[in-house]
Image (tube, rainbow, N blue to C red):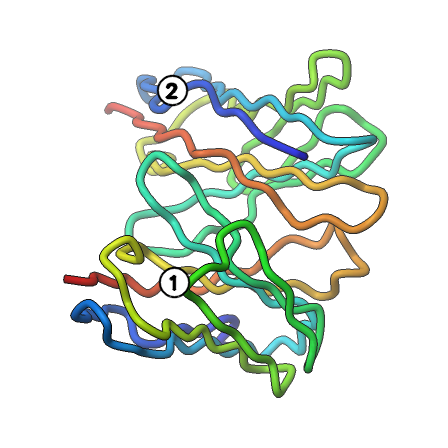
């Protein structure tokens, strides 16, 4: 069975500082990996995805994520955090082979202080 | 382009009542799904559909029914509501189940309380 772990319930950073939100995954074979963001009282919005190729993936709003196959990780990063980045972030995985549905992590709340 | 539209936004039910959560998408997506979001548990898949007339169970299907008579609509039915079904429900769609790297498009959710 596939799974996603987001080890931090909450990440706090100051505006202007770099941020990292951690994600590790378990899947049979190669993964498709996704990051989504959820603002209060809204549905999830797609940020970025890893399919294949370059391990550094760039997405919306200045976010990027680094795929590390040996560590089975897909950490979300941003060089300079904004207060408006404060939201709930979800990592998700599905296998590339066969048919599987998307499995989400439990989410990490990012709080950026002014 | 409305995307994924869910109605109602809020609903309060008494135990044992039934109701249908509506979901419609205008993107001609083949794949549609229902998730529930509970604190500390992330999103869990209830049911999904890979096309009109085809549905399948997800991780937590008990107590819920679905049907997919058209490409656009994917309603979720609670037959006899229980307090354990208090949650926020999200409908999501994607281009096709044959494009597994296509991102999901989410509605804004229905907040359901069962008393």
Please state which of residues B50 and B24 is positioned toward the viewer in this rendering.
B50
Residue located beneath label 2 in the image: A16
Residue located farthest toward the top when viewing the structure as drawn:
A70
Q: Is residue B14 left or right of residue A49?
A: left
* Above or below, comparing residue A108 to residue B91 in the picture: above
Residue A77: x %, y % from top left: 54, 23
Location of residue B9 by image quarter:
bottom left
Q: Is residue A41 left or right of residue A66?
A: left
Residue A94: x %, y % from top left: 70, 41
Which residue lies at the image location 64% right of the left edge and 26% below the top edge? A25
Which residue lies at the image location 46% right of the left edge and 19% below the top edge? A7
- State the separation of the CA atoms marked 2 and 1: 30 Å
Are dots 2 and 1 on a single chain? no
**Quarter placement of the N terminus of chain A:** top right
Residue located beneath label 1 in the image: B108
User: Is label 2 or label 1 in front?
Assistant: 1
Residue A67: x %, y % from top left: 71, 23
Q: Which chain is home to disc 1?
A: B
Which residue lies at the image location 65% right of the left edge and 82% below the top edge? B71
**Quarter placement of the C terminus of chain A:** top left
Element carrying mark 1: loop
Element carrying mark 2: loop
Disc 1 crowd, CA 10 A, few/some/many (<14, 14-19, 20+): many
Q: Which chain is home to disc 2?
A: A
Disc 2 crowd, CA 10 A, few/some/many (<14, 14-19, 20+): some
| Residue B1 visible in the shown view | no
């Amino acid at each position: 069975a596939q799974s996603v772990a987001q080890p931090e319930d909450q990440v706090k950073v100051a505006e202007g500082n770099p941020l990292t939100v951690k994600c590790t995954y378990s899947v049979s074979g190669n993964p498709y990996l996704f990051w989504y963001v959820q603002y209060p009282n809204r549905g999830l919005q797609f940020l970025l995805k890893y399919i294949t190729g370059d391990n550094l993936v760039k997405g919306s709003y200045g976010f990027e994520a680094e795929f590390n196959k040996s560590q089975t990780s897909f950490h979300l990063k941003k060089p300079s955090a904004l207060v408006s980045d404060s939201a709930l972030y979800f990592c998700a995985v599905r296998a590339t082979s066969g048919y599987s549905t998307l499995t989400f992590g439990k989410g990490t709340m990012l709080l950026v202080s002014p | 382009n409305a995307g994924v539209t869910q109605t109602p936004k809020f609903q309060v039910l008494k135990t044992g009542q039934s109701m249908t959560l509506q979901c419609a998408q205008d993107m001609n997506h083949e794949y549609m799904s229902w998730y529930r979001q509970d604190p500390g548990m992330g999103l869990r898949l209830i049911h999904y559909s890979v096309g009109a007339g085809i549905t399948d169970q997800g991780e937590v299907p008990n107590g819920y029914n679905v049907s997919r008579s058209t490409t656009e609509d994917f309603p979720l039915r609670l037959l006899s509501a229980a307090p354990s079904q208090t949650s926020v429900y999200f409908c999501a769609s994607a281009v096709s189940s044959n494009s597994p790297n296509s991102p999901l498009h989410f509605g804004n959710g229905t907040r359901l309380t069962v008393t």
